[in-house]
Image (cartoon, rainbow, N blue to C red):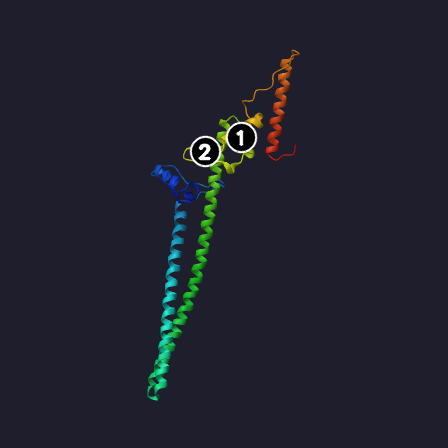
Amino acid sequence: MENLETLKPVLGEELYTQVAGKLEGAKGILLANVADGSYVPKQKFDSEIAARKQTAQQLAELTRNHDTMTAAMEALKKQLADAEKENAAGKENAVRFDEQSKTFQQKIADLTENLNREKGRLKEAAGLKEQVERLTAQLAEKDHEIAEIHKAGRVLEELRTAGARNPSAVIRIIDMGKIREEESGMTGLTEQLDALRQTDAYLFKNVTPPKGGVDGSSAGARVKAADTLNQQVNDEIRRAAGLTM
Protein backbone atom coordinates (compact mmCIF):
# COMPACT_ATOMS: atom_id res chain seq x y z
CA MET A 1 0.00 0.00 0.00
CA GLU A 2 1.36 3.37 -0.97
CA ASN A 3 2.20 5.93 1.71
CA LEU A 4 -0.93 8.00 2.55
CA GLU A 5 0.82 10.73 4.56
CA THR A 6 0.07 13.32 1.88
CA LEU A 7 -3.67 12.76 2.41
CA LYS A 8 -3.51 13.65 6.12
CA PRO A 9 -3.93 17.47 5.58
CA VAL A 10 -6.96 16.77 3.36
CA LEU A 11 -8.68 14.02 5.38
CA GLY A 12 -7.81 15.23 8.88
CA GLU A 13 -6.16 13.14 11.60
CA GLU A 14 -9.21 11.06 12.56
CA LEU A 15 -10.44 10.22 9.03
CA TYR A 16 -6.87 9.63 7.84
CA THR A 17 -6.31 7.07 10.63
CA GLN A 18 -9.51 5.22 9.68
CA VAL A 19 -8.74 5.20 5.96
CA ALA A 20 -5.15 4.09 6.53
CA GLY A 21 -6.34 1.27 8.80
CA LYS A 22 -8.88 -0.02 6.29
CA LEU A 23 -6.45 0.17 3.37
CA GLU A 24 -3.58 -1.50 5.28
CA GLY A 25 -2.37 -4.41 3.18
CA ALA A 26 -4.81 -3.66 0.34
CA LYS A 27 -3.56 -4.68 -3.06
CA GLY A 28 -3.95 -2.85 -6.35
CA ILE A 29 -4.55 0.57 -4.78
CA LEU A 30 -2.11 3.28 -5.89
CA LEU A 31 -1.66 6.97 -5.08
CA ALA A 32 -1.97 8.69 -8.49
CA ASN A 33 -2.16 12.24 -9.85
CA VAL A 34 -5.32 12.08 -11.95
CA ALA A 35 -4.98 15.78 -12.88
CA ASP A 36 -2.22 15.27 -15.42
CA GLY A 37 -1.91 11.49 -15.50
CA SER A 38 1.45 11.37 -13.71
CA TYR A 39 2.05 8.87 -10.92
CA VAL A 40 3.64 9.78 -7.59
CA PRO A 41 5.81 6.76 -6.65
CA LYS A 42 6.16 5.87 -3.00
CA GLN A 43 9.94 5.68 -3.42
CA LYS A 44 10.11 9.26 -4.70
CA PHE A 45 7.79 10.52 -1.98
CA ASP A 46 9.72 8.71 0.77
CA SER A 47 13.01 9.95 -0.73
CA GLU A 48 11.91 13.57 -0.56
CA ILE A 49 10.74 13.17 3.05
CA ALA A 50 14.05 11.49 3.98
CA ALA A 51 15.97 14.29 2.23
CA ARG A 52 14.09 16.91 4.23
CA LYS A 53 14.85 15.11 7.51
CA GLN A 54 18.51 14.65 6.55
CA THR A 55 18.83 18.33 5.62
CA ALA A 56 17.31 19.38 8.94
CA GLN A 57 19.76 17.12 10.81
CA GLN A 58 22.71 18.50 8.83
CA LEU A 59 21.58 22.05 9.52
CA ALA A 60 21.31 21.34 13.25
CA GLU A 61 24.76 19.68 13.30
CA LEU A 62 26.38 22.55 11.41
CA THR A 63 24.78 25.04 13.77
CA ARG A 64 26.15 23.17 16.78
CA ASN A 65 29.63 23.10 15.19
CA HIS A 66 29.40 26.81 14.50
CA ASP A 67 28.45 27.56 18.12
CA THR A 68 31.23 25.28 19.45
CA MET A 69 33.94 26.91 17.34
CA THR A 70 32.69 30.38 18.20
CA ALA A 71 32.88 29.54 21.91
CA ALA A 72 36.37 28.10 21.46
CA MET A 73 37.51 31.24 19.64
CA GLU A 74 36.17 33.46 22.41
CA ALA A 75 37.96 31.34 25.00
CA LEU A 76 41.24 31.65 23.10
CA LYS A 77 40.81 35.39 22.79
CA LYS A 78 40.32 35.59 26.55
CA GLN A 79 43.46 33.50 27.12
CA LEU A 80 45.36 35.82 24.80
CA ALA A 81 44.12 38.83 26.73
CA ASP A 82 45.16 37.22 30.02
CA ALA A 83 48.59 36.46 28.56
CA GLU A 84 48.97 40.08 27.52
CA LYS A 85 48.19 41.15 31.08
CA GLU A 86 50.82 38.79 32.42
CA ASN A 87 53.38 40.19 30.01
CA ALA A 88 52.70 43.67 31.27
CA ALA A 89 53.61 42.50 34.80
CA GLY A 90 57.22 41.89 33.90
CA LYS A 91 59.61 41.64 31.00
CA GLU A 92 60.70 38.24 32.22
CA ASN A 93 57.49 36.82 30.81
CA ALA A 94 58.07 38.39 27.38
CA VAL A 95 59.47 35.25 25.73
CA ARG A 96 56.73 33.02 27.10
CA PHE A 97 54.07 35.51 26.14
CA ASP A 98 55.50 35.76 22.64
CA GLU A 99 55.28 32.01 22.18
CA GLN A 100 51.78 31.84 23.63
CA SER A 101 50.69 34.75 21.48
CA LYS A 102 51.90 33.05 18.31
CA THR A 103 50.21 29.81 19.34
CA PHE A 104 46.93 31.53 20.12
CA GLN A 105 47.06 33.57 16.94
CA GLN A 106 47.56 30.41 14.89
CA LYS A 107 44.71 28.66 16.66
CA ILE A 108 42.48 31.67 16.06
CA ALA A 109 43.45 31.69 12.38
CA ASP A 110 42.70 27.97 12.09
CA LEU A 111 39.35 28.36 13.83
CA THR A 112 38.48 31.34 11.64
CA GLU A 113 39.20 29.27 8.55
CA ASN A 114 37.09 26.39 9.85
CA LEU A 115 34.32 28.77 10.83
CA ASN A 116 34.22 30.30 7.35
CA ARG A 117 34.13 26.82 5.85
CA GLU A 118 31.23 25.84 8.14
CA LYS A 119 29.38 29.03 7.20
CA GLY A 120 29.66 27.99 3.56
CA ARG A 121 28.24 24.58 4.39
CA LEU A 122 25.42 26.21 6.36
CA LYS A 123 24.57 28.31 3.32
CA GLU A 124 24.48 25.21 1.14
CA ALA A 125 22.29 23.40 3.69
CA ALA A 126 19.90 26.35 3.78
CA GLY A 127 19.60 26.14 0.00
CA LEU A 128 18.82 22.42 0.21
CA LYS A 129 16.23 23.09 2.89
CA GLU A 130 14.54 25.69 0.66
CA GLN A 131 14.40 23.18 -2.20
CA VAL A 132 12.86 20.53 0.06
CA GLU A 133 10.26 22.98 1.36
CA ARG A 134 9.38 24.07 -2.17
CA LEU A 135 8.97 20.45 -3.27
CA THR A 136 6.88 19.70 -0.19
CA ALA A 137 4.58 22.63 -1.06
CA GLN A 138 4.25 21.36 -4.63
CA LEU A 139 3.34 17.88 -3.36
CA ALA A 140 0.73 19.40 -1.03
CA GLU A 141 -0.74 21.37 -3.95
CA LYS A 142 -0.92 18.20 -6.05
CA ASP A 143 -2.64 16.39 -3.18
CA HIS A 144 -5.21 19.20 -3.00
CA GLU A 145 -5.82 19.03 -6.76
CA ILE A 146 -6.29 15.26 -6.58
CA ALA A 147 -8.74 15.63 -3.69
CA GLU A 148 -10.76 18.26 -5.61
CA ILE A 149 -10.88 16.07 -8.73
CA HIS A 150 -12.04 13.10 -6.65
CA LYS A 151 -14.72 15.25 -5.03
CA ALA A 152 -15.90 16.57 -8.41
CA GLY A 153 -16.18 12.99 -9.69
CA ARG A 154 -18.32 11.97 -6.72
CA VAL A 155 -20.50 15.09 -7.13
CA LEU A 156 -21.05 14.28 -10.82
CA GLU A 157 -22.13 10.77 -9.83
CA GLU A 158 -24.56 12.24 -7.27
CA LEU A 159 -25.96 14.58 -9.96
CA ARG A 160 -26.54 11.65 -12.31
CA THR A 161 -28.33 9.78 -9.52
CA ALA A 162 -30.41 12.90 -8.79
CA GLY A 163 -31.64 12.91 -12.43
CA ALA A 164 -29.70 15.93 -13.73
CA ARG A 165 -30.13 16.26 -17.50
CA ASN A 166 -26.55 17.47 -17.93
CA PRO A 167 -24.42 16.86 -14.77
CA SER A 168 -21.42 18.66 -16.33
CA ALA A 169 -23.51 21.81 -16.71
CA VAL A 170 -25.24 21.57 -13.33
CA ILE A 171 -21.92 21.15 -11.47
CA ARG A 172 -20.90 24.60 -12.71
CA ILE A 173 -23.96 26.11 -11.06
CA ILE A 174 -23.55 24.62 -7.59
CA ASP A 175 -21.11 25.96 -5.01
CA MET A 176 -18.41 23.29 -4.60
CA GLY A 177 -16.96 25.18 -1.64
CA LYS A 178 -20.07 24.37 0.42
CA ILE A 179 -19.74 20.63 -0.20
CA ARG A 180 -17.90 18.57 2.42
CA GLU A 181 -17.08 14.87 2.56
CA GLU A 182 -17.51 13.50 6.06
CA GLU A 183 -17.76 10.04 7.64
CA SER A 184 -21.55 10.14 7.38
CA GLY A 185 -21.37 11.03 3.67
CA MET A 186 -21.36 14.11 1.46
CA THR A 187 -22.96 17.25 2.94
CA GLY A 188 -23.90 20.56 1.36
CA LEU A 189 -25.06 19.09 -1.98
CA THR A 190 -28.60 17.94 -1.21
CA GLU A 191 -29.65 21.43 -0.09
CA GLN A 192 -28.36 22.99 -3.30
CA LEU A 193 -30.10 20.39 -5.48
CA ASP A 194 -33.39 20.94 -3.64
CA ALA A 195 -33.08 24.67 -4.26
CA LEU A 196 -32.36 24.13 -7.98
CA ARG A 197 -35.40 21.87 -8.31
CA GLN A 198 -37.48 24.78 -7.03
CA THR A 199 -35.94 27.52 -9.18
CA ASP A 200 -34.68 25.61 -12.26
CA ALA A 201 -36.64 22.36 -12.31
CA TYR A 202 -36.11 21.95 -16.05
CA LEU A 203 -32.48 20.97 -15.32
CA PHE A 204 -33.76 17.61 -14.04
CA LYS A 205 -35.34 14.70 -15.90
CA ASN A 206 -38.31 14.33 -13.57
CA VAL A 207 -39.96 17.61 -14.75
CA THR A 208 -43.62 17.21 -15.84
CA PRO A 209 -44.42 19.39 -18.91
CA PRO A 210 -47.59 21.59 -18.71
CA LYS A 211 -50.83 19.89 -19.93
CA GLY A 212 -53.02 21.18 -22.83
CA GLY A 213 -55.80 23.80 -22.48
CA VAL A 214 -59.61 23.54 -22.76
CA ASP A 215 -59.71 24.03 -26.55
CA GLY A 216 -59.20 20.29 -27.14
CA SER A 217 -55.68 20.68 -28.62
CA SER A 218 -53.97 19.00 -25.65
CA ALA A 219 -51.57 16.98 -27.85
CA GLY A 220 -50.34 20.10 -29.62
CA ALA A 221 -49.99 21.93 -26.30
CA ARG A 222 -47.88 19.09 -24.87
CA VAL A 223 -45.60 19.20 -27.90
CA LYS A 224 -45.26 22.97 -27.56
CA ALA A 225 -44.57 22.64 -23.82
CA ALA A 226 -41.94 19.96 -24.46
CA ASP A 227 -40.24 22.18 -27.06
CA THR A 228 -40.27 25.09 -24.61
CA LEU A 229 -38.78 22.88 -21.87
CA ASN A 230 -36.04 21.63 -24.17
CA GLN A 231 -35.21 25.20 -25.18
CA GLN A 232 -35.03 26.22 -21.51
CA VAL A 233 -32.69 23.35 -20.73
CA ASN A 234 -30.46 24.15 -23.71
CA ASP A 235 -30.36 27.84 -22.78
CA GLU A 236 -29.46 27.03 -19.17
CA ILE A 237 -26.72 24.61 -20.23
CA ARG A 238 -25.22 27.24 -22.54
CA ARG A 239 -25.40 29.85 -19.77
CA ALA A 240 -23.75 27.50 -17.27
CA ALA A 241 -21.01 26.73 -19.79
CA GLY A 242 -20.32 30.47 -20.25
CA LEU A 243 -21.57 30.56 -23.86
CA THR A 244 -23.25 33.68 -25.27
CA MET A 245 -27.02 33.30 -25.54
Along the viewing direction, whichever of 191 and 25 lies nearer the viewer: 191
Q: Is residue 165 visible?
A: no
Separation of residues labelled 2 and 1 (CA atoms): 17 Å
Along the viewing direction, whichever of 237 and 197 lies nearer the viewer: 197
**Sequence-wise, which precedes: disc 2 or disc 1?**
1
Residue 186 is marked as 2
| Picture quadrant where residue 82 is located | bottom left
Residue at image position (33%, 86%) is 93
Q: Quadrant of the C terminus?
A: top right
Residue at image position (55%, 31%) is 170
Q: Is residue 59 above or below residue 161?
A: below
In this view, which residue lies farthest toward the top? 216
Report which residue position mark 1 lands on.
167
Residue 35 location, x and y as percent?
Answer: 49, 40
Name the amino acid type tagged 2: Met
State the SS at label 2. Answer: strand
- What is the crowding at mark 2: few (fewer than 14 residues within 10 Å), some, or many (at least 20)? some
Q: Is residue 140 above or below residue 70?
A: above
Residue at image position (37%, 57%) is 57
Residue 42 location, x and y as percent?
Answer: 39, 45
Residue at image position (62%, 20%) is 225
